[in-house]
Amino acid sequence: MKIYHNPRCSKSREGLAILEASKMKFETIQYLDNPLTKEELTEIIKLLRIKPIDLIRKNEAIWKENYKGKTLSDSEIINAMAENPKLIERPIVINNDKAVIGRPPEIIKSIL
């Protein structure tokens, strides 16, 4: 099990606390310090069963200033997240072949 975590985000910290309370083994990946590759992002999006645009934090200044209002392909959206990890929604929890975006954090319990 893995959590893609941003310690500065309250929802991400709540998600981490849920995993810690579960007593299950998991790996914490601080994706701002260790940016995800395009391949990793593509795999995560497949596990989440969403479109790449649904993993974007649309209120981030980077998005508003550089991408908002543009017609982007899925590949271009994934490239934007790989280049700007702040754009990735968080936390993301993966347990085998199941994955969720922990918003609200309680949804993480559905894949434990």
Image (tube, helix red, strand yellow):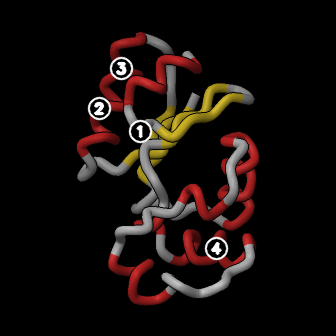
Looking at the picture, which amino acid does disc 2 mark? Glu
Q: Nearer the viewer, mark 4 or mark 2?
A: 4
Amino acid type of the residue tagged 1 in the rendering: Arg
Q: Nearer the viewer, mark 4 or mark 3?
A: 4
Q: Are marks 4 and 3 in contact (CB under 8 Å)?
A: no
Residue placed at 33% from the left, 79% from the top?
61
Q: Secondary structure at mark 1?
A: loop
Spatial CA distance of label 4 from label 3 is: 32 Å
Q: Which mark is residue 14?
A: 2
The secondary element bearing badge 4 is classed as helix
Residue flagged by tag 4: what amino acid is it?
Ile
Distance from the alpha carbon under mark 3 to that under mark 2: 10 Å
Mark 4 is surrounded, within 10 Å at the Cα level, by few (under 14), some (14 to 19) or many (20 or more) other residues, namely many
Distance (Cα) linking label 1 and label 2: 10 Å
Is residue 88 depicted above or below 15 in this figure?
below
Does residue 83 appear left or right of residue 42 in this picture? Answer: left
Q: State which quarter of the image contains the C terminus.
A: top right
Q: Which residue corresponds to mark 3?
A: 20
x then y, percent, for residue 63: 44, 78
Mark 4 or 1, nearer chain start: 4
Marker disc for residue 103: 1
Residue 11: % across, % down? 30, 40
**Mark 4 vs mark 2, CA separation in Å:** 27 Å
Residue 60, label in figure: none
Mark 2 or mark 4, which is nearer the start of the sequence? 2
Residue that carries the numbered disc 4 in the rendered image: 77
Instruction: Give the mark nearest the N terminus, 3 or 2.
Output: 2
The quadrant the N terminus occupies is: top right
